[in-house]
Image (cartoon, rainbow, N blue to C red):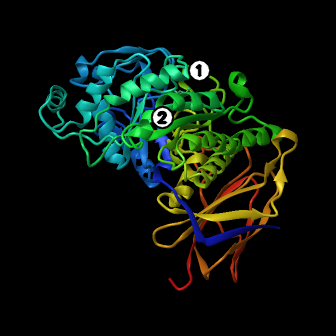
Amino acid sequence: MAKLVINNTKKISHINPEIYGHFSEHLGRCIYEGIYVGEDSDIPNVNGMRTDVVEALKEIRIPVLRWPGGCFADEYHWKDGVGPKEKRKKMINTHWGGVVEDNSFGTHEYFELCRQLGCKTYINGNVGSGTVQEMSEWVEYMTFDGVSPMAEERKKNGHEEPWRVDYFGVGNENWGCGGNMRPSYYGDLYRRYQTYVRNYDSDHPIRKICCGANVDDYLWTRGVLDTAFDHAKDEDCHGFMDGLSLHYYVHPEGWKIKGSSTDFDEEVWYKTLGKAWRINELVSKHSIIMDAFDPDQKIGMIVDEWGSWYSCEPGTNPGFLYQQNTIRDALIAGITLNVFNKHSDRVKMANLAQVVNVLQAVILTEGAQMIKTPTYHVFNQYKYHQDSELLSSWIYDPDVVGSGKWTLPKVTESVSEDKDGLITITLGNLSVDESQDIDIELAEGSWQVEKASVVAGEIHAHNRFDAPEEVTEQAFVAYEMKEKGLSAVLAPASVTLIRLKRQGK
Ligand code: AHR
């Protein structure tokens, strides 16, 4: 019997809603087909955005959406994507499948999408192949409220009012697809480019995000901060660097082979979850480096690409990164989001890659059909953590699963308290076939269950267009109330949500 001890008198840190963010790139069928079908489509849409997808994302309270890339961002020239659609330039999407990009989804369409979703905006600028002037004019186009060449252009293109840019990424993966730079070179470019990301709206300053490391490239984190941080300190951080990114993908068989999304054995299950669990080590170690420069934690860690990356589905364009999503992905999401909650003193945003039809998507579409993946259901469970306070919690007497290098804690957890005093507990049972009895004890108060749900199934279970509800969020009833909390039985290979409210409330 494991025991989850919750000290609900001790609040650790604020869980930014943006930790539950998403990422949309001009890649495969993410933007086109997955989100944007155009005003003339037979698929129900509002101003070209699929109604089913928008509604599903609102349901999980999508807090922020990153766009337009990814690697695409560093070859994107925003002026090609504004003005009359028939006149927009076409380009080859060299990174992703070599398909023609007709630029029919551009700046205006992105802000319209975020308006419909009611989410914050995160634009990623082009450092790899773009100029300082181009970046500076994009910011002026989007946010300047007054008379200026770019603001006039925006108005001519149909949008009188400026938009709000909440986050702006100064380049993407500049150690790789964004220019193959070295840390000090990028650090200097960051200093220069960010200077011209002007804050025209002082009430809503743009949060600037510096390109951080891939996986365990601690030299990049150190090197970029060495070059770019001095000035940030002078400026008290704000307005110079608000975030430093980190990218981490889980490939069961490594970057080259990757591995199937649906065909795996028990050993690969634990190996994959072990790799997901590694995010804890990565966040901790990058945090140590950041702490040395920024002990007051003014700069957020922004994990703006994370998730599973498998071999693409047989018969699909390899450049489109389309993959299925099983119970294993539900566990990857559960493990990772618990880690982000636990590190919410430093992690201020995270963006699952990617929102629709690409990598560990929450939604898959085929023509007019749409399905929600197991990962979607986990985001629906975890949405209650958004904007809550992380509570001190730990597992007493933990069990382990797997073996050798991939020996893992059997149960992962995080706990938070929201503004109304409700407590959210999210638990993952990583075992393929063993349930887990668990006592959940709170330091203070008498509690009752307000809502409880579970996402569980045989480890390969997934939703298909001809079987869209193989994996769903089910009511969780395997619990019994106790004096100081409750005892529960966690199903094998499951993610469980328990929401508690004070008795009598
Ligand atoms: O998400 C797919 C790609 O992965 C992104 O374009 C890039 O930033 C990363 O390498």
Q: Classify 315 as above or below 415.
A: above
Q: Residue furthest right?
A: 404
| Residue positioned 41% across, 27% down in the render | 191
Q: Secondary structure at mark 2?
A: helix
Viewer-nearest of discs 2 and 1: 2
| Residue positioned 42% across, 18% down in the render | 75
Q: Classify 31 as above or below 103.
A: below
Relative image position of residue 368 (x, y in whole percent): 43, 38
Nearer-the-camera pick, 172 or 474: 172
Residue at the spot of label 1: 318
Residue 486 in sight here: yes
User: Label 1 sits on what residue type?
Assistant: Pro
Instruction: Name the image quarter holding the N terminus.
Output: bottom right
Nearer-the-camera pick, 396 or 383: 396
Counting residues from the N terminus, which is met first, the one under dot 2 or under dot 1? 2
Q: Secondary structure at mark 1?
A: helix
Residue at the spot of label 2: 229
Q: Report the disc number at residue 279.
A: none
| Residue positioned 70% across, 21% down in the render | 256
Q: How far apart are labels 2 and 1 at the CA level?
A: 39 Å
User: Label 2 sits on what residue type?
Assistant: Phe
